[in-house]
Amino acid sequence: MSVSETYLRWRYRLVPDHVVGEILAKRWIDNAVPLLILFAVIAAFGSAIPDFFSAASVGDLARQWGEFSLLVLALMVVMVAGGIDLSVGSTFALGNIVALALITVAGWPMWAVAVATVAAGAAVGLVNGLLVGYLRLRAFLTTLVTLIIVRAVVDMLLLAYSVSIAGTFIESDPWYFLGEGYVLGVPFSVVVSVVLALLIHLVFSRSRAGWHVLAVGGSRRSAYNVGIPVRRVICATYVVSGAMAALSGLLFASRLGGAGADTGVGMEIAALTAAVLGGNSLGGGRGSAAKAVIGSITVLIMVNSLVRLGVSSGANSLLLGLVLLGAVAIDVRWLKNRHKLLSKVYVSPTYARLPPAPPTEGASPYAVNDRLRDVELIGLGEIDGPEDVILDADDNIYAGNRTGDIVRFLAPDYRRHEVFAHVGGRPLGMAFAKDGSLLVCIGGMGLYRVTKQREVERLTDETNRSWLSVIDDSRLRLADDLDIAPDGRVFFSEATVRYEMHEWPVDCLESRGNGRIICYDPNAGTTRTVLGDLVFPNGICMAGDGQSFFFAETWACRISRYFFDGPKKGRVEVVIPDLPGYPDNINRASDGTYWLALVGLRTPSLDLALRMPGFRKRMARRIAPDEWLFANINTGCIVRFDETGRIIETLWDRGGENHPMITSMREHKGYLYIGGISNNRIGRLKLEGFDASWTGPASYWGRP
Amino acid sequence: MRVFGRLSQEQIVFGLAVLLTIGFALTLPGFLTANNLLNLVRSVSILGILGVAMGLVVIGRGIDLSLVALMAISVAWALQLAAGGYPLWLALALGLGFSLAVGMINGWLIAYVEIPAIFATLAMGAAIYGFGRYFMFSLDVLYMSDNARPLEALGQGSLFGVPAPIYLFAAVCLVTYLFLRYTAQGRYLRAVGDNLQTARITGAPVRPIIVLQYMISSLIGFVAGLVTAASVASMNTRVANSTMVYDVILVVVLGGIGLSGGRGGVRNVVVGTLLIGVLLNGMTIMDIQYTVQNVIKGVILLAAIVIDTLLNPRDEQTAQQGDI
């Protein structure tokens, strides 16, 4: 191996390129930029203002933040549903004057004042909600107009009551507690706002109502089509928004105890800036309480610090405007380009060197022949993509179908077929358990069981989360093949954690150890990953000793054996290191050897490309996916090997007419049944010199 | 709705304006005098000029919330320069250049950066006001200096007994009408507003047209600013923070220019302006309190938007996500 190739190998082993794409695919990445801006703002003003971090300064700022963040949260709730509420500033002023008027002029008790104030805000929200939600007016203009109207109403109330408000002394302890009290050393308004932020977070992430709001914002039309009451949901968001804005006004009133003509003026722009700066999307569907909190802290610190630095109101306005412009620009460009960036960097090839491929001609055990020419076809054109086929004790054939069904072809002539069970996902590997139920790996769903009574049950769809993985690998993305140990433990392979069912060939471009083998223990009900970092682990087959199984790694072109019990427990031994093609399922043969399907054959060009990760990376970035160099998965063969890894025989279809692509084969009573993931048929080949009474279930679980 | 369906909003509003005029004429003494009527039109002519600018942008499916702020700041700057010794023509040229530059930035942000027009211009309005207050002048109100006196003719002069602002309003209307009706750019603008994707596929230079529409709007805004300054011999920059821009939108929407773009013309603006003029004039004569006037105006604007939505319902199937 040349020096440069050694360097390449270590470079790709040590630098985890794939992490970039995985981080970009995370949902929390949206919060990264706003958080960085927040830290920058704190650093900048913290160093510019001498006593920025003093207790008095922080406490004062925190109390204001409690009021301001309520407004931002209110706006966020509306924005997430795809609307906007510019009237929050006026509603805030309304809450302020109503609370003051009720406590001083009307002399109501505190609890009644609080309820009435929030109700007044909710009423404004209801007007907005009825207009925008039910009458489907444009949110921006409608709330702009309610802003004007509510502001005018506030002005009228001011004219009528400001003198008597200023002249009355409020004698109510709870009133002052709102504005000046502490709970465990934290200002009361902060407590209110944190509690509400947590509540909103829980509602949006954990409750049906919150999901409805997110769905409406994400795609109003789709939300309507799935039966979500879109109009009611939108209306409700405005009511919540109005109520929270008025609550904020109540806190403000009790803190300052005065009403002026400029209360809440321009507040909507500050709140809007904060919401957008935090990363809440203008079109809706993307937003969270965390984003609102981040944005509100940033804007409050900016505005407050500028005032403390003695900058004129003009500079303040200029800065807010520019920040809003910048934030919206970043938001728009980010939304538009994130998936482009992701699609460019997600595929991250690594260095992979395969051993030289053995020849497929001459005296080689892999020499091409034409033994599959006489395959009979079952269900031609009636089945779509039987990845695996399996036969029960009564000779019926079970095969997966692309439509999400397990199809049963009935013995003896297999002319009739029926849907055995609808599982809803793509059925891949299958195995019969001791009790006769059918265990099946379903791509994208996990490990399932279909009982003899045709009931579909989930066995497991998650495993332990590995600590250093950026991708959430606890969820099963692509459970591929399984086999069952004598004690009932199920070992199954997950081909890759980085790709979904429909794009599994892309994993070949990476040829990294993205897959793993997982053990499901039905006795303990646990699921644990037993082997990680496997290169597309695929077929699994129990060895005859009951202590180990063989497994195939497709893109590594090798077969290994894992000992899960016995003296060699925990060890992995390579059985066949250099296959000429990509191995798929492995199954038992009647004479104690094993059948292996090769889904496709290696090509020198791809073998070379696997040693050139930079080349594959450029390819993935620069050209369209349908022009990428992929592994050949069109022509394969069937290989039989024994426990030592010796190749006994190979079955080919030279013309590629009957069975061009093979992913699975099962021996049953002297016949070999063949499946292929992109075939529209099941093949059946008469075997000469094999035990005509041998069946798979009997081999595993003894004679019934 | 059947009745409304046959009448366009423009006709309804016009009818309403006529009814109000008749009502006021019968009930309010001094309403139906030539002097008061001229006063009425004159008082709303600035609103009307701004309405034409806004209407043009709205027809192109945009909105320009920075219109009033830009008008105030650019004209105030021109007055400041003139007071500082610049020749009047140079001061005006610089003010106009500033106005056009900001309009171009607006258009660039909207057409190329693809920021929604509402936010781009909202933020731009705040930024311009701050920029002016921080870098250009420190006073709220800038008075006309002596070498700028010739401008006063624009606001206070009159010809054949008709005040100059009315002539200017008419001129702006006429030029805009001709632009929309007879130039390729005007027709493209309408096409862009009607359906941006189709216009782009057809080969219209969509992005330059959007930039152009904001530049025209800032140009007309500058004219309106000159008239404002000339009428009272000063420019109050605080108008940038007032609700005046909403009054302008009121005029446009009231006149029947749909906010979804592509519909309407200059005539709608004139009709909307007339109704507002009659209303304001009547309320002033009746001596209704200012805040109550605001409420009445707001409710009428709300009603106009509701009727607009009922007459030109948003198409849920083609409405863009995030079009708020």
Image (tube, coloured by chain):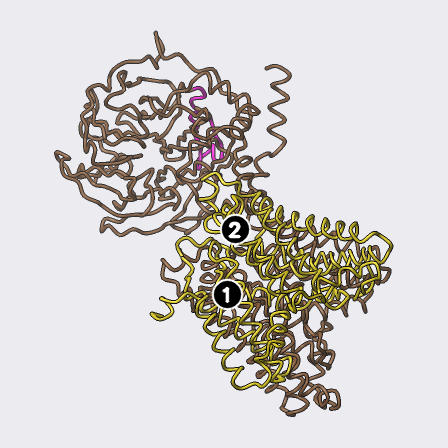
Chain colours: A brown, B yellow
Q: On what subunit does the disc labeled 1 rest?
A: B
Residue under numbered circle 2: B180
SS for callout 2: helix
Residue in the image at 52% along x and 69% along y? A238
- In the rendered view, tell whether residue A71 sits above or below residue B223: below
On whether residue A691 falls in the magenta region, the answer is: no
In front of the other: A107 or A675: A107
Residue in the image at 71% along x and 65% along y? B157
* A179 left or right of B64 in image: right
Q: Which amino acid does label 2 sit on?
A: Leu
Both on one chain, marks 2 and 1?
yes
**Can you tell which mark lies on residue B255?**
1
* B165 left or right of A122 in image: right
Crowding near the residue tagged with mark 2, few <14, some 14–19, many ≥20 C-alpha atoms within 10 Å = many
Residue extent of the magenta highlight: A558-578
Label 2 or label 1, whichever lies nearer to me, is 2
Residue A162 percent across, percent down from the top left? 71, 86
In front of the other: B271 or A414: B271
Crowding near the residue tagged with mark 1, few <14, some 14–19, many ≥20 C-alpha atoms within 10 Å = many
